[in-house]
Image (tube, rainbow, N blue to C red):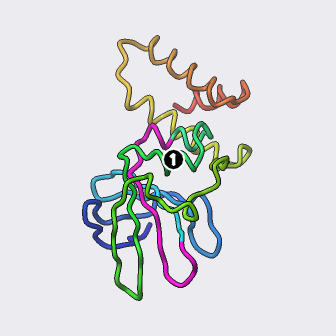
Amino acid sequence: MNELFGNIPGVGTLTMTEIYSFYEEPLTFLCVNELKQSYLLMAIGDGNKEQWLLIPISYERLIQMKLNQITLYDVWTKSETGQVCYITKNTDIFTVEWKYSPEILAEDLPLQDNYLDLPKDSEYTGDIQKTLIISDVDKMWFTDDKDKLKFITNFLQKLQLSDVEKRTLIANL
C-alpha cells in the first residue's frame, strides 16, 4: 500500500492496510507505522481542507470493531489512550494536533449507534475472520493442543459461522 502522511510526530510514517468505508477516497481506514503499530483514521472536515482523526488502536479493539461489538462512536470517544490526533492538510503541509477524546467536536464523530457493519456474506469478511482466528491463535500461548482447540472452538462460536464454515476454517489452520 502507500504512505499517506509522511512522518507524523509521535506516530511515524503511516501506510494504509485496510479500508472500511470509501466515497471517492478512503473515509475510514486502518494504517500501520514502521513498527507495525495500528492506527484508525477517519476523514472529517467541511471540504475546504483535508482533515482526519487518528487514534492508536489495539489488536483487541480492532477485533471488537470488526465484529460489531463496539460502536464507531465509542471507538473514537473512548479511545484506549484517551487521546485523538487531528491531522490537517493545507496544500502539501500537514499539521498535527493531539487532543483528549472528550474534546472531539460532535460534528466530527460518527452517529452514536453506527457500527462498522462489514458485509457478513462477502469474501472480505471471511478473510478477516480467518485472519483474526489465525492471528489470535498465533498470539496465544497454549499448554497443549487441547487448549488450542478449545480456544478456536470458543472463538468460532463468537463469529456465528455455520458448521461448514467452521470446519473449513479449522481445516485451513
Single out the residue that lies furthest toward the bottom: 91
Reply above or below: 80 against 110: above
- Residue 171 in the image: state x and y as whole percent: 58, 28
Judged from the image, the secondary structure of the residue bearing numbered disc 1 is helix
| Quadrant assignment, res 169 | top right
Reply above or below: 24 against 90: above
Image-based side of 34 in relation to 57, left or right:
left
Image quarter (top left, top right, bottom left or bottom right) of the N terminus: bottom left
Residue nearest the observer in this picture, 46 or 129? 46
Image-based side of 111 in relation to 45, left or right:
right
- Residue 70 in the image: state x and y as whole percent: 57, 40
Q: Is 29 inside the magenta-drawn segment?
A: no
Residue at the image position 48 percent from the left and 34 percent from the top: 134
Single out the residue that lies furthest toward the left: 10
Which residue range is magenta in the image?
45-62
- Residue 27 in the image: state x and y as whole percent: 57, 66
Residue nearest the observer in this picture, 53 or 11? 53
Q: Amino acid at mark 1?
A: Val
- Residue 19 in the image: state x and y as whole percent: 55, 60
Reply above or below: 6 against 20: below
Residue at the image position 41 percent from the left and 66 percent from the top: 86
Residue at the image position 38 percent from the left and 51 percent from the top: 56
Residue picked out by circle 1: 75
